[in-house]
Amino acid sequence: MNETEFDKYAAAYLQMHAANIRITGEPPEYFAEYKVADVAALLKRDGFSSNPEILDYGAGIGTSVPYFRRYFPASKLIALDVSRLSLEVGESRFGGDAEWVHFDGLLVPYPDQSFDVVFLACVLHHVPHEEHAAAMTELFRVLRPGGTLAIFEHNPYNPLTRHAVNTCPFDENAVLVRPSRLRTVAERAGFIDASVAYRVFFPHSLRALRGLEPYLTKVPLGGQYRIHARRPR
């Protein structure tokens, strides 16, 4: 990830993102909240009852932060990013709701086994594919035994998603990642029980059908997908 590339869009990111996804009929906040809600549901399903310590890797301007506070009000939350300007924008928006931490895009500046949850929201398509293995190894390092990895990415099999990425200024150097490849990279880093779930099938105009989405997670047509995996105990 390149700091300069993201710095130049930090101030206008939210407006640009909203314009880019206008066809869905939803604001950026809709997509931010569903991801955090997914993580909360996964942890509840797995019986994780305490307040997890969470790393939001590639947090940008902190779009996910208010939803982590809603679903995990007592959790420690680290918002980590390569873009100092994005972190400044995030901190100006959400202040003490997270710790805002800059890093070099390679080494997470925390000791081994520091977090219960590592969360990535549409980050890895900005990272050169040849660097994915090293990034995943670093995520494995900072996750505690039994901890949860949750990665959300744009689905390259969805034509509307590809169009949105291809026409988005801050995705100018992005390369979408196939879910099967990302799952393999996670497994090679040591993660277990890696699974793919497709998400975001219906725009706002068809929101009455969203109750069907839990039954469509194996259908590779959703606008995004989620990789869920664990570090072995």
Image (cartoon, rainbow, N blue to C red):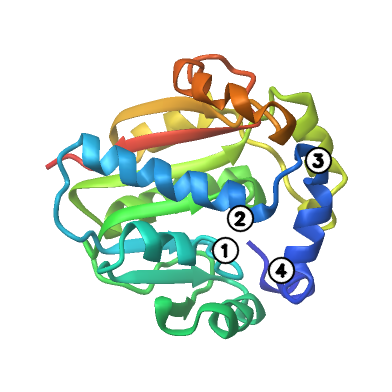
Q: Amino acid at mark 3?
A: Ala
**Alpha carbon separation for disc pair 3 and 1:** 19 Å
Q: Is residue 122 visible?
A: no
Q: Which residue is mark 1?
A: 63
Tell me the crowding category of disc 3: few under 14, some 14 to 19, or many 20 or more residues within 10 angstroms, Cα based: some
Residue located at (58% from left, 71% from top): 82
Question: 183 or 188, which is in the foreground?
Answer: 183
Question: Is 181 positioned to the left or the right of 71 in the image?
Answer: right
Please state which of the two labelled residues, at mark 1 or mark 4, is closer to the viewer.
Answer: 1
Which circle marks residue 211 in the picture? none
Contact check, label 3 and label 1, Cβ < 8 Å? no
What element does badge 1 sit on? loop
Q: Which residue is mark 3?
A: 164
Quadrant in the rendering for residue 109: bottom left
What element does badge 4 sit on? helix
Q: Amino acid at mark 4?
A: Phe
Task: Name the spot of residue 223 as percent of width and height, x first.
Answer: 65, 31
